[in-house]
Amino acid sequence: MKNKILTAAIALAALVLPTTASASAEFYAESGGWTIFKGERSCHMTASYEGDALLTVYVEDAEQAVFWLQNPSWKSIRDEAGYKLQIEFDDYGAWDMPAFGKSDQDGPGIAWVGNIASDRNDNTFMGEFMVAEGMTVSINGRRVGSYSMKDTRSASLTLSTCLRLAHQSSDPFQGLEGVPADPFRGI
């Protein structure tokens, strides 16, 4: 079962993650220390941390977000290799997250999928991400790093606005075929 979850996470993230952080995306905004980019049907935000770490969050829909934490010094990470991370926001409790290795010109990193929509326990990874002051990433009980999430809420709200725009049609009347000119007639 764990292998099926990891395989699904890798497949989803491979579809969402572009080859590079800003591939086919344009600058959208700066917010709370994050840079937000708008793609054709997705948006992502990126923040830099000390030690050359880079965290990128990709969103295509309201269900899941792909997180990609990179650091050029993590040379032993192998592309597509599976890893099991523990991610904890503040002291909310750790999330066990299947992850995989992925590299680009910014260096090797680990990517995982976090839920935006509530799970069966009404928990959301993205919800904790948005309200936390900090995030700690560990693997096999060994801390990978701690990262500030200060002002992440404002950046996440800007990311949400970006995503709405990315999904908006240029034609505001598209899909309204068959709607009467006066929807109030006959009421």
Image (spheres, rainbow, N blue to C red):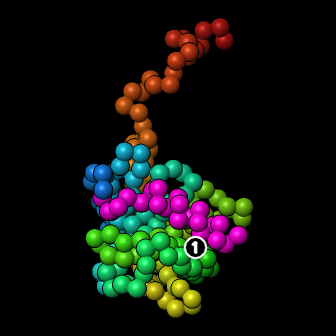
Q: Position of residue 153 (x, y in %)?
A: 45, 63
Give the extent of the magenta segment. Answer: 1-22
Q: Is residue 12 left or right of residue 71?
A: right
Question: Tag 1's secondary structure?
Answer: strand
The kind of residue on which mark 1 rests is Pro
Residue found at x 37% / y 72%: 103
Q: Position of residue 78 (x, y in %)?
A: 43, 78
Mark 1: few/some/many CA within 10 Å (<14, 14-19, 20+): many
What residue occupies the far bottom of the structure in this picture? Answer: 142
Per the picture, the main secondary structure of the magenta-coloured stretch is: helix
Quadrant hosting residue 92: bottom right
* Front-lying residue, 141 or 79: 79
Residue found at x 37% / y 45%: 40
Residue found at x 59% / y 66%: 7
Q: Quadrant of the N terminus?
A: bottom right
Would you name the residue on which mark 1 appears?
98
* Front-lying residue, 167 or 131: 167
* Front-lying residue, 94 or 67: 67
- On whether residue 159 falls in the magenta region, the answer is no
Q: Position of residue 140 (x, y in %)?
A: 57, 89
Q: Is residue 156 visible?
A: no
Question: Is 112 located above or below residue 39 in the figure?
Answer: below
Residue found at x 66% / y 12%: 187
Q: Position of residue 89 (x, y in %)?
A: 53, 76
